[in-house]
Image (spheres, helix red, strand yellow):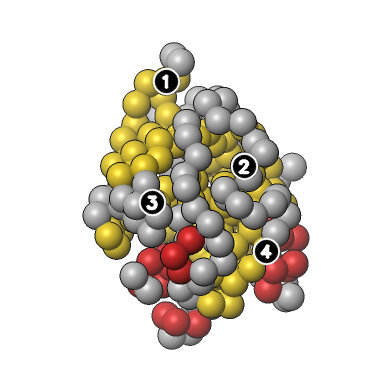
Amino acid sequence: MSVRSLWLILYATALFSPVVFGGPLTNDIIPVLNENGLSGWDEQRFNGKTAYEVVELEGEQVLQAVSHTSASGVYKRQTVNIKDYPYLNWRWRIENRINTHDEKVKSGDDYAARVYLLIDDGLLFWKRRALSYVWANQSIAGSVWDNAYAGESVRMFVLKSANDPTGVWLNEKRNVYEDLKLVFGEEITSVDAVAVMTDTDDSNSAALSYYADIFFSAE
């Protein structure tokens, strides 16, 4: 299933107006996911369909992902100047861990939750790049490696691992300007899309995960 990571690069090519669950908007925030749910988002399937749906959980509207031996993702094309808005903020939550082994090889390239940043360099599609923040099962937080399918054009960055709890919301705030400089070794000043993906096809397993409040901020 070698196209899995390549679609994330291929589709990072267009501009659209930004549309976070909850909270007022200010000039210091660029929302990505809000009360409109998946309006403005697109889907790409690889092996079966992970079901993405806005649901009510504990009194709030959030994005639910249900994967049964499937691999598909949803993405939103949105160009953001990350020198002005360097922080990507979100909440995520997994209800169970998946049975993966070596996540650096194709047979282990499954994650209960991922958040992608996509960069369009204006080159041929196989030259475009992505950074994938992942909730890993085996690898420790802070690990970085080339994606097993796409190679060095897609870099994997572990934020959460088996040591982190299931069934509770965890908050993330990443300086993506600095993270992209770290993983690609050069300055990148804008990103062109954000994607989320919960996939379990390589491990023949299942996962239930949630995402909420995805937005860029100046501080």
Q: Which mark is residue 152?
A: none
The secondary element bearing badge 1 is classed as strand
How crowded pointer 1 is (Cα within 10 Å; few <14, some 14-19, many 20+) is rated as: few
Q: Position of residue 211 (x, y in %)?
A: 48, 37
Q: Which mark is residue 57?
A: 1
Residue drawn at (44%, 36%) of the image:
209
Label 2 close to label 4 by CB (< 8 Å): no
Residue drawn at (61%, 31%) of the image:
165
Q: Quadrant of the N terminus?
A: bottom left
Alpha-carbon span between mark 3 and mark 2? 16 Å
Q: Is residue 187 above or below residue 45?
A: below
Q: Position of residue 208 (x, y in %)?
A: 40, 36
Q: Quadrant of the C terminus?
A: top right
The secondary element bearing badge 2 is classed as loop
How crowded pointer 4 is (Cα within 10 Å; few <14, some 14-19, many 20+) is rated as: some
Residue drawn at (67%, 39%) of the image:
163
- The kind of residue on which mark 2 rests is Ala
Alpha-carbon span between mark 3 and mark 1? 23 Å
Q: Position of residue 187 (x, y in %)?
A: 72, 72
- In this rendered view, identify the residue nearer to me: 15 or 212: 212
Alpha-carbon span between mark 4 and mark 3? 20 Å
* For marks 1 and 4 on the same chain, the one whose residue lies earlier in the sequence: 1
Label 4 close to label 3 by CB (< 8 Å): no
Q: Which mark is residue 144?
A: 4
Q: Which mark is residue 162?
A: 2
- Tag in front: 3 or 1: 3
Q: Which mark is residue 200?
A: 3
